Image: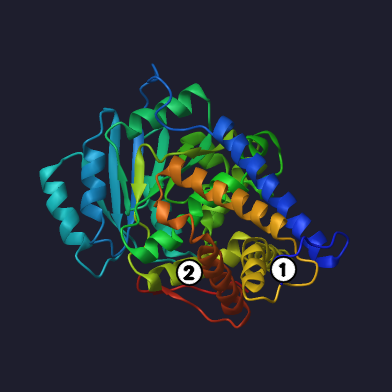
Amino acid sequence: MNLFPAGAPGTFLYNQQVGVLVFCAALTLILLGNLLGMRRLGRLTPARERPLVSVLIPARNEQANIEACVRSLLAQTYAPFELLVLDDASTDGTAEALARLAAEAPRLQVLQGAPLPEGWLGKNWACHQLAQAARGDFLLFLDADTRADPRFLEDVVALACRARLDYFSGVPRQDAPTLAERLIVPMLPWIAHSLTPVPLIRWLPLAFLAPAVGQCMFFRRAAYERIGGHAAVRSVIVEDFALARRAKRFGLRWDLVDASPRLTTRMYRTLAQAWDGFSKSLFGAFGYNLPVFAFVWAWMLLVFWQPWIGLALGLLGRPPAGFSPLLALAAIVLQAGLWAATALRFRSPLLQIPLYPLTIAFFAAAAVRSAWRHYRRRPLTWKGRQLPVKK
């Protein structure tokens, strides 16, 4: 018995497989374009300009992260910078850790967050307060779970000055020591590397295409003020995307860069944190557009699961009618190549490469939860605060 028939051209399933293969080939072209055209920290010589950089970190319940983050920034080789950390009403040991660090390093300025006003989300309000207190011409917002190489600020300034950028967001390397993290978090650099045609978006004036990574966002102060800063996106959960799209809409020089040689992050330490973290933001990243959102995640499941399911059914002696194993294998080879290229560039765990279908399934499930939460008006609690549901 032939477990793997040659396939039947012209049938619905065969044509669907062709579509999957064409899509994977398109993603490969995007990846190649990013390999050639996506800017990367560490590749430029230092700039002659030495502007004052304000490094701004909102911190709420970051006891596990804040000391490593601050110490990495205090060790920077770039001299004219100020470091401001805002304690946003933390209920763990964040305030005590910051007080110890400030006693050691006068460069560190610790701000106490004001009460959260109505209509604001916590992180947006914290970033707004930081920007108001900053003195620099360059504003660099970092999450408290990041850790910087000593040359990080030098390279940020070099990139901003030599490329004359008004705004850019950096994709950090994802530190993933546990199995759950290795399975989940590499999805973020993969999206930036394989789904986002950065050189094309850089050129096109279409604001809705501009993505961002909120863990690392750079602004010239004049550009930040021109787009209204965080006050303009005060109630938006995915404020990084909203700010990037405003930057494009205002005609500013935007970019998404590879910051992985100089910046590392550990986003989530448990599966539950990742589940809640991605569930709160996935639907918002699509502008709460349900038809587009549903199509994208259904298509992603089809693309990355269909070849494996078809081959598995063939091995069980029940190959689907019209299924082509050659097309399936070709799709799997391209898909594995996409994940391998991203893993090598962003130093993600290689274990993730053969497990990418499980990564897609996790994100699809989180996407369903994100949309369900929105339509059922089910808020999430994040870092001790209840997030409102967009009406």
Q: Is residue 320 left or right of residue 372?
A: right
Q: Is residue 75 left or right of residue 379?
A: left
Q: Residue at x 46, y 76 (%)?
A: 380
Residue at image mark 2: 118
Q: Residue at x 15, y 41 (%)?
A: 105
* Quarter in which the C terminus is drawn: bottom right
Mark 2 neighbour class, 10 Å CA radius: few under 14, some 14 to 19, many 20 or more: few
In the displayed image of the protein, which residue is found farthest to the front?
1
Callout 2 amino acid:
Glu
Q: Quadrant of residue 368?
A: bottom right
Q: Is residue 182 left or right of residue 301?
A: left
Q: Position of residue 261 (x, y in %)?
A: 37, 37
Residue 216 visible somewhere in the drawing: yes
Colouring chosen for the image of the structure = rainbow
In the displayed image of the protein, which residue is found farthest to the top?
48
* Quarter in which the N terminus is drawn: bottom right
Secondary structure of the residue carrying numbered label 1: loop
CA gap, disc 2 to disc 1? Answer: 66 Å
Residue sitting nearer the eye, 260 or 370: 260
Of labels 2 and 1, the one closer to you: 1
Q: Position of residue 389 (x, y in %)?
A: 55, 74
Residue at image mark 1: 2
Q: Quadrant of residue 137?
A: top left
Q: Which mark is residue 156?
A: none
